[in-house]
Amino acid sequence: MASAITASTVGEFILSPKHSPDVSNKKRIHHALRLYHPDRFEIAVVAKLEGRDKEEVRELGEVVAKCLNKLLEKEN
């Protein structure tokens, strides 16, 4: 499942012209990075899960955060 998440697919969503059109790409990426920051993601999402789903969701959140960092590098 994590292999389906790439910088390209994350970028398609975060940088879509339908997603916050009046906000710069860089600001959209920064906002998403705050949401997917591992510590914040752990508290807001992973901690609310039970069982084996926790580790998979944690891993997916980390993949998204890495993709967002790649997108931010391209914007700089």
Image: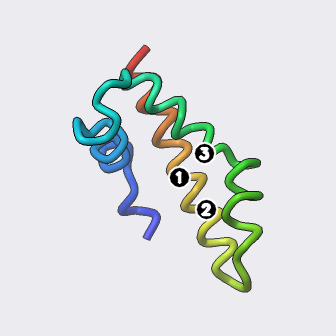
In the picture, measured across the screen, residue 49 lies left or right of residue 61, that is: right
Spatial CA span between label 1 and label 2: 6 Å
Query: Which amino acid type corresponds to the residue marked 3 in the rendered image?
Result: Leu
Residue 55 versus residue 45: which sits nearer the camera? 45
Q: Quadrant of residue 45?
A: bottom right
Mark closer to the observer (3, 2): 3
Mark 1, residue position: 63
Which element type, helix, strand or loop, lies under badge 1?
Answer: helix
Mark 3, residue position: 35
Does residue 25 lie above or below 67 as drawn?
above
Q: Residue furthest toward the top?
A: 76
The reply to whether dot 1 and dot 2 touch (C-beta < 8 Å) is yes
The reply to whether dot 3 and dot 1 touch (C-beta < 8 Å) is no
Q: Position of residue 49 (x, y in %)?
A: 70, 77
Disc sitting over residue 59 in the figure? 2
Q: Position of residue 60 (x, y in %)?
A: 54, 61
Which element type, helix, strand or loop, lies under badge 3?
Answer: helix
